[in-house]
Image: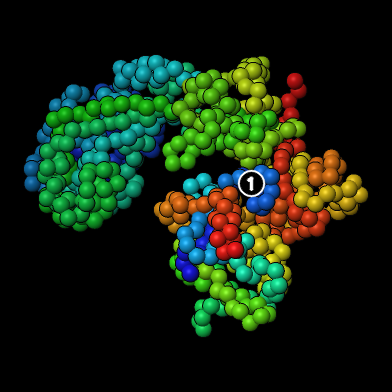
Amino acid sequence: MSPLTEKDRPIIQLLLSTGTCPRCVLRFCCVGSQMLYRHPHEELLKDLQKFLRNSHEEEGSVCLDVSNPPCKRLRLEPGEEGASDRNCNVAIPHLPGNICNVCLGVLQEFCEAGFVKKVCQKVNSADYQFISFVFSVSLPPQLSVRERAAWLGVKQNLGLPFPEDDIIQLKEAYKWIIHPQLSEELGVPADGKVFFSAFFFLRHILSLLFLVLDSLFYFTLQSVFTRMAVIKALEKIKEEDFLKHFPCPPSSPKNHCDALEIQCNNGAVFVAGRYNKYSRNLPQTPWIIDGERKLESSVEELISEHLMAQFKADSFNFSSSGREDVDVRTLGNGRPFAIELVNPHRIHFTTEEMRRLQQAINDSSDKIQVRDLQLVTRSAIGRMKEGEEEKTKTYSALIWTDKAIQREDITFLDDIKELKLDQKTPLRVLHRRPLAVRCRLIHTMRSEYIDEHHFRLHLKTQAGTYIKEFVHGDFGRTKPNIGSLLNRTADILELDVESVDVDWPPTLAD
Amino acid sequence: MLDAFTRIQLPLVGAAQPELPRSVGRWIQHSQGEIWFCALVFSAVTLLICVITLAEAHPLLQSGKTIKNINYQISANCSRLQNKVSGKSKRGAQFLTELAPLCRISSSDGEEYTIYSCIRGRLIEVNENILTNPALLQEKPSTEGYIAVVLPKFEESKSITQGLLTQKEYEEVLLKRRSSAS
């Protein structure tokens, strides 16, 4: 019992006598030793009682030594009069079956092996792959009230000047106790940084406590007894009012907390790759207007349905390095994409398994193909988004002109380098983008003559250039444009993305 | 004057120019009177974007007319050139009723024509290119010679497209008119 000092004695005495469990007593003594909390409940109780008894046996020496005012104060309290020994005896009948008036049993039965076993059974039955875990607990809001009452009780009765913040938080103490036990039972380390977490919700039926507090809370507590509402209300209520309306330390409860439910959650995993789109009738993401689907599938869905099934995830988020229109194909090495799989049950995949997964996606549709499919970290996805802004893209466009063209009419396009465009936000996207004039560069162009009214143009451009508008001019809102360069009316019939020049994700050997 | 509207709708995907091969589904509306104005209506998802242009039948597009001046200052304290929009939601746009004048165009023969919005909605931009190059109005009336871009209210988008005529229907109306005039 080394961490306990003389100044703790009156606190221990007061709290034990009002039905506080030994671990809560340690918390109020601001004991920060994690090991101590892990001692069995009964042992702790015995130790505390021994600590008290020892002090009384040595009362002469110790009390004189310390001669702290709280002791005097304690003796002045009504009901606390008389021999200290008797107070001690009041504390001793504290039975393990009693529910703690501060934590409502959180640091008692919810720390026992039986409960840990039950939690682990639940977690195991949820069938997750995980390599470490964190156990979070949601406590009943009224515990804040009891915590405050206990602190005010100590402060009022003993006049101890330690701040409320020094008390070891109930949640913290609970994790100190429960984490090593869960870790052993689950066979993986507890680690706040990673992945798997189990949320555990405790509830306490609205006890007398709240009925008593009702009148006090009436003006301060707006709606329901949510945790935040209770904490806010506690901040507003003056200490004197609180002491007047509520027994401090709090009275013993009749019921302990109920374990409401356990929710398991695995941290998201990320899968990246590149996709090709070979259809001019396939949007990148589901195309839904007024709740009605325009086209039956999408790139996003064709890839994700396989991943969802394999990772057994709840949901997914698709992102990519830019996007193409529904009628634009993406050829070449494809467009980098990443998919976040939310709350996956399965997270371990070998290279071979990922290869098979990629094959399954490719076998299932001829509209898309996927390559370089791999597991990546969340932070690596930033590289893909950088590419969206900075990197170049190459396109191939089939162009029609109104007036006939000859081979030599279009060759000059090949000599144009770093052509600067002023692009007003295209009319076709104006409803969802701000109106602005954006400067974009066409790095190079290469023309391929087809016939008097058609030619193919290969372009290398800065990311974010609207190619369709560069061809037809968008009512003269993109300047210059192919029409103005050729001094004709031009329009675009087909567009393909030939490459998205982002060197992420890493290329994989086949 | 109000009934003299022409409206054309273009598809969202593909060409902007009405005379191009991929352009289909242009709509034109009219009741009685002259059809002088044209709104190229882009159906962007369920929201419309309307580009206001002169219609084929407008006197300014008839041979022999020369444009002298285009004026976006429609009253002493209202100029369409001062229209500024910001953000996705196009805050600060001037609101136009169907009767709101966009600009006045005078021709060398002394006539002045007021160009009306035809569409209820917010003014997104006016075409400043026609100020420096008025010939665009006559050379490319339905593309680079447009007058303005108007964004109708979402809830009114549907009623704007209802009762529009297609390009073909418009041509039939013109034909009928010419034959009855002659």
Q: How is the image coloured?
A: rainbow
Q: Position of residue A189 (x, y in %)?
A: 49, 24
In percent of the image, x 24 and y 32: which residue is there? A203
**Residue A88 vertical position relative to residue A350 in the rendered view, above or below:** below
Q: Quadrant of the C terminus of chain A?
A: top right
Q: Position of residue A38 (x, y in %)?
A: 36, 26
Amino acid identity at mark 1? Ser
**Residue A198 vertical position relative to residue B81 in the rendered view, above or below:** above
**Residue A327 vertical position relative to residue A187 in the rendered view, above or below:** below
In percent of the image, x 69 and y 35: which residue is there? A329
Q: Residues within 10 Å of mark 1 (few under 14, many from 20)?
A: some
The residue lying toward the viewer, choosing from A166 and B179, is B179
Residue A269 visible from this viewpoint: no
Q: State the residue position of label 1.
A: B23
Q: Chain of mark 1?
A: B
The residue lying toward the viewer, choosing from B76 and A429, is B76
Looking at this rendering, what residue extends furthest in the right direction? Answer: A408
Residue A14 occupies which quadrant of the picture? top left
The residue lying toward the viewer, choosing from B135 and A57, is B135
The residue lying toward the viewer, choosing from B12 and A287, is B12
In percent of the image, x 15 and y 42: which residue is there? A210
In percent of the image, x 28 and y 31: which residue is there? A202
Residue A277 occupies which quadrant of the picture? top right
